[in-house]
Image (cartoon, rainbow, N blue to C red):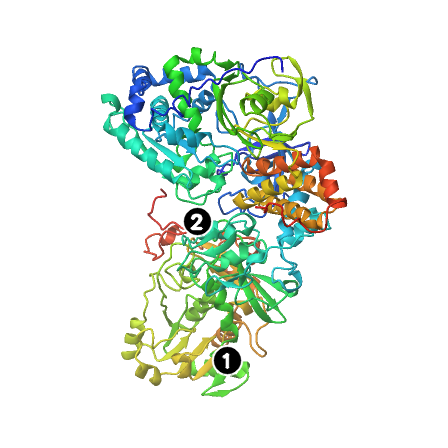
Amino acid sequence: MIAPDNKEMVNITLNGIEVEVPNGINAVEAAALHGKEVPHYCYHPKLSVAGNCRMCLVEMGTPMRDRASGEPILDEDGTPKIGWVPKPVIGCATNITPGMHLKTESDLVNECREGIMEFLLVNHPLDCPICDQAGECRLQEFATDYGRGYSRYVERKNVKPKRTRLGPRVTLDDERCILCSRCIRFSQEVAKDDVLGFVDRGSFSTLTCFPGKELANNYSLNTVDICPVGALTSTDFRFKMRVWFLKESKSVCTESSAGCNTLVSSREGTIQRITPRRNDQVNDTWMTDSGRELYKLVKAKSRIRRPSFQGSDLPLDDAISQAFEALKNKKIGVVASCHSSLEEQFLIKRLVEETGAKVFIRGHFGEDDGILLSADRTPNLRGALVAGLTNHYPSDHLNDLNESLADGHVDALLVMGEDLKESGVNEDHLKKVPLVFLGTHQNSTSDCAEVVLPGLTVFEKSGSLINRSFFLQSFDQAIPCPAGLMTDFKILARLIDLFSEDSIAPSELDQIWEALSSSENSVLKGITFLKIKKGAIQLDESKWEHLSFVEKEALHYLPTGVIAS
Amino acid sequence: MSVSTPKERRIILKHADDPNYSNRIGCYLREGGYENLKKAFSMQPGEVGEEVLKSGVRGRGGAGFPAGMKWKFLDRKSGKPIYLICNADESEPGTFKDRQIMYKDPHQLIEGMMITAFAIGAKQAFIYIRAEFHEGARILERAISEAKKAGFCGNNILDSEYSCDLVVHRGAGAYICGEETGLIESLEGKRPNPRIKPPYFPAVLGLYQCPTIVNNVETLCNVRHIIGMGGEEFSKIGKPNNTGTRIWCVSGQVMKPGYYEFECGSLTLGQLIFDVCGGLRPGRSLKAVIPGGSSAKVLRADERFSGTLKDGTEFDWGLEDIPLDFDGPMAAGSMSGSGGIIVMDDTVDIVEAMANVNAFYAHESCGQCTPCREGSLWMRKISQRMCSGGAREEDADLLLSVAKQIEGRTICAFGEAAAWPTQSFVTKFKEDFIRKATDSPKERDPKSLQLI
């Protein structure tokens, strides 16, 4: 990351046209700002500059100055004389200076690109028909855009290992590797797990793991994402699906409060993979391997697919009525969840206000890896704070609920997916009270619930979440929900309607946001769901500054009170 | 040849072949060794640098960049430590001068290095020696310990407050380690992948991202003599802009191959080959000469070179008239490089010669950047196929085109080093390449020498 973070704008001449770009950014980025693609392989905006693929060669010149006086030298027509560098320079390592001249479209540049493309292809196998990268392959794209279109190579191609296991999730095809070193730099600079390197020399160079090591860190699949060709492949996704069949939906990772932006790729209602989506304020272009596995929960065995009452299936409408029957005229305890979306939490709050119920909420915590897996393993703890479900920082148990059940202050329960036994609630207490469970997967609590309402996974619904930096981010529905079910907040709205005789609870996202944003003191004031969809919104976190959040310093996150070094 | 051939003037190799001289410190001191170090220590570091600048001495490693200028580029404001590295990774095919210096007169190098370290303010100096010179490494290590005992190196040199440690680091056997940023990477313990410039100019961001000076063995030895005789005096040796002596390493089909030290520009290529080296073998005629190590462009025996020199004089030379200095071979479209002169007579199959050169570069390419990595191996495959009966008429043009796609587009100068031989061989001996395709047998003569 050679380019400094500099907002000062300067004028440069790009292909003969004067344009304005931020000072100090590199030529690849500068050209991109003005719609000129400079093809590149090894350069990645979030990694150090290696400059080894040579695909981004451009012509560069700077205004000449008199050595003695420092005055600009002028041409006959009075314009500054440009000293063109005799050789083409790499755009990725050429930082913009005021008055710089760049040519990204010239005979020399085109010839360079043709040459580099030819070199990259001479030892590249013709695997495209069976290659996972086909369709999203830089080599294919640039060969079409900048290559010669025919081959002059009649020698034998180099032969290298075709399926090397680099780690539990990554498989390497060395023949396809163009030795750009992105994966090596990622491992060193982002994952901080330096296990990859090249062995052998010249064209026989081969990517490999260091002896006795494997690429097993929780970020290993990012190497597959940034691999510009089909060399590094995801063992999980390998040979599963042609990428052009995939439908992509914007989502947010729910693994922890880091809130990585993701793309969920699905075909015909089945999710095939999850990949990170670039957000320079949250996750750059990375996400964890464990976060990519979450889609498997959709089709997990323990998934709750049917509403049930006392163990037997029934239509959802009837189940909601049964839930109302179980809870009405009782001292209700609502176990809310930090896994719920902000909209669901808002409706829980509405329900609590309507019924006078008591709210209990717990957090889920784990080890913080200092990158994108934060200590808070729920995606929306801050949402619970913003929705007003609690003023305290949730602990990792529900002991207070246990007490309330023991002394009879609570005699009916609505549980949002949590496992109460695991949270420190005595099983005997649960058997004594009617329990309504709304969740996606079976657990010991759903097993003893009187009414079970199936919830939807994050992939089957839309909503918003607030991450560790108080960024409000939205996620889109990626796949249709199972037949006969509906999204959680609609179930909650129905339930509220049953309790309330004189009003109708909002049951669409827009209506919920109308209510959320109209409250005078709320940090959500003036926000609409459409605005969130356009980009993450930073919320004012000052109300909760006194709470001791558990997250540690990490990528794009600085805990309150820590001064940036 | 009307002008008589001048005599050798040995400055660097003065004692190289003296039977009464060994590489021990006793011999060196007997012959006035380390006196120039004392002289340098009586001066200010800046004055030493000025003397070297005045001498006009140009780097002996290949590029011929003025050493005094190089020192001037050093970033002294950063406050970071400054390092001095001696590039003793002599591995350019055809070059064997540094080996003579290190094996036969190592203290000369140590003295030159300590003067240089003093001038640039380095507290730590390295000799990065080619792995294959294991005996050389031992000789240098013994010499360093002798020099340390005598107070010429290490702590408090000559009882001054100035200290500079000197260590020998053995390379791991790769040509690319001779490229200065590749060398620095290797010295740091990494793969010797050359660095991109900008931003990694050694004088600013060198070893461990600190300002670093990398000089060739012969250059550093010259520093010793510059201080001895004064920059002014040194600059009178040789010709303007081509000062001092140069060691020419002659190999190939001459009667007396070997190393010869002459004042720069004092003799011509023809004098060196036909007088100094005893000419060609009986009945042979000259076909081609590579004047500066295998990466220099080949010169054809019947070529004419004409043009205007930098000082404005016009020239019209045959191969034998090329003056041996920095600018002469350059004016002839090649370079004097590291001084390795390879002579080829009419028995040489020029395509096979090129195939060997290409094999070397394909083997030694580090593999970091695309053009050199893929291009060098491709050229090797083409030229080996041509030598094995599979030559096609279009191969000559293909070779030229591949070489052109490498030249000027790589991270380091290795790209040019790999491209220039092919470009010059094919352009200048095109008929040999065409003949390979049209007249050659479809199999390689089993009696011919094995290709690399």
Tell whether B421 sits left or right of B89.
Answer: right
Labels 1 and 2 in the same subunit: yes
Q: Is mark 1 on a helix, strand or loop?
A: helix
Tell whether B307 sits left or right of A189.
Answer: right
Question: Which chain letter goes with mark 1?
Answer: A
The image quarter containing residue B333 is top right
Question: Which chain letter goes with mark 2?
Answer: A
The image quarter containing residue B168 is top left
Foreground: A106 or A173? A173
Residue B184 vertical placement versus A293 (above, below) = above
Which label was assigned to residue A320? 1
| Quadrant holding the N terminus of chain B | top right
Q: Can residue B154 be seen in this view?
A: no
Looking at the rendered structure, the kind of residue marked 2 is Glu
Counting other residues with Cα less than 10 Å from the Cα at mark 2, is it few (<14), some (14-19), or many (20 or more)? some
Which label was assigned to residue A189? 2
Residue A501 vertical placement versus B429 (above, below) = below
At 65% from the left and 45% from the top, the residue drawn is: B383
Do labels 1 and 2 touch, CB within 8 Å?
Answer: no
